[in-house]
Amino acid sequence: MRIVAISGSLRVISTNSLLVRVAKMQAPPEVEFIIYEGLGDLPHFSSEIDGEASPESVQNFRKLLQSADGVIISTPEYAYGMPGSLKNALDWTVSSGEFDNKPVATISASPSASGGERAHASLLLTLGAISARVVVGGKLTIPMIRTKLNPAGELTDLATVEALHTLVMALIQGIESAGE
Ligand code: FNR
């Protein structure tokens, strides 16, 4: 089983990227867990550069998604929505359909008390448009994320680690039940 994870933040010290790395540690060893690192390399979507001769970075992104049994996306909130770079990446899958019926789990995290719930809602709206299948138990909103890190920037809040574990297991269960 292969899970691909996407952080919607391009920041080097991103909290969402940290959550994706901690999610990776929660996966059982027999699960291949790949973190997609190419979000910032994708060109701005235009249907005029889509198709068979689409840019190499897009082709690589699509191939990786095609090889995934399930996907985890962790999004920050920018101006009440998901970051443009993440929306851009999802736009590249509209014509090629990689998310069609794909089991997905979603995370939002924010330093605010809302936990990025509006970005989470915008992510779910787009995932609905591309027919992704958000699994049962596959949504996690994490408020006040910076209070859950130690001074070294590590995730030390055990409840959050546990919630990530539960989320990863829900995705695995969702993938397995899709194969029955
Ligand atoms: C933010 N941030 C933010 N947070 C939030 O809860 N709601 C919002 O609408 C916004 N808007 C926003 C806009 C811009 C331009 C910036 C730079 C920041 C704060 C944001 O959640 C915070 O910087 C996170 O830490 C970003 O996620 P990563 O990079 O840590 O994963």
Image: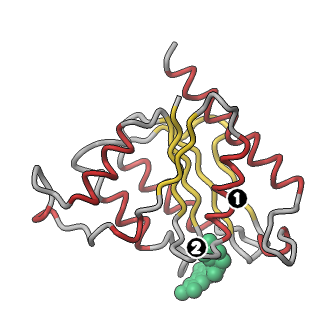
Which residue is identified by label 1? 141
Q: Locate residue 153 relative to residue 4 in the image: left or right.
A: right
Query: What type is the residue that disc 1 sits on?
Result: Thr
Q: Nearer the viewer, residue 11 or 134?
A: 11
Determine whether 87 is above or below 160 in the image. below
| Residue 131 on image: x %, y % | 38, 41
- Residue visible at 10% across and 49% down in the picture: 52
Determine whether 136 is above or below 53 in the image. above
Determine whether 23 is above or below 102 in the image. below
Q: Locate residue 112 relative to residue 49 in the image: left or right.
A: right
Query: Sequence-wise, which precedes: disc 2 or disc 1?
Result: 2
| Residue 16 on image: x %, y % | 63, 65
Mark 1 CB near ligand 1 (8 Å cut): no
Determine whether 43 is above or below 132 in the image. below
Outermost residue on the top side: it is 180
Mark 2 CB near ligand 1 (8 Å cut): yes
Q: Secondary structure at mark 2?
A: loop
* Ligand 1 located in image quadrant: bottom right
- Residue visible at 73% across and 42% down in the picture: 26
Q: Locate residue 46 relative to residue 40 in the image: left or right.
A: left
Query: What type is the residue that disc 2 sits on?
Result: Glu
Determine which of the numbered discs, if any, sits on residue 77 in the image. 2
Q: Nearer the viewer, residue 166 or 25?
A: 25
Graded by Cα atoms within 10 Å as few (under 14), some (14 to 19) or many (20 or more), the crowding at tag 2 reads many
- Residue visible at 64% across and 42% down in the picture: 138
Query: Can you tell which quarter of the image residue 74 is in?
Result: bottom right
| Residue 150 on image: x %, y % | 87, 72
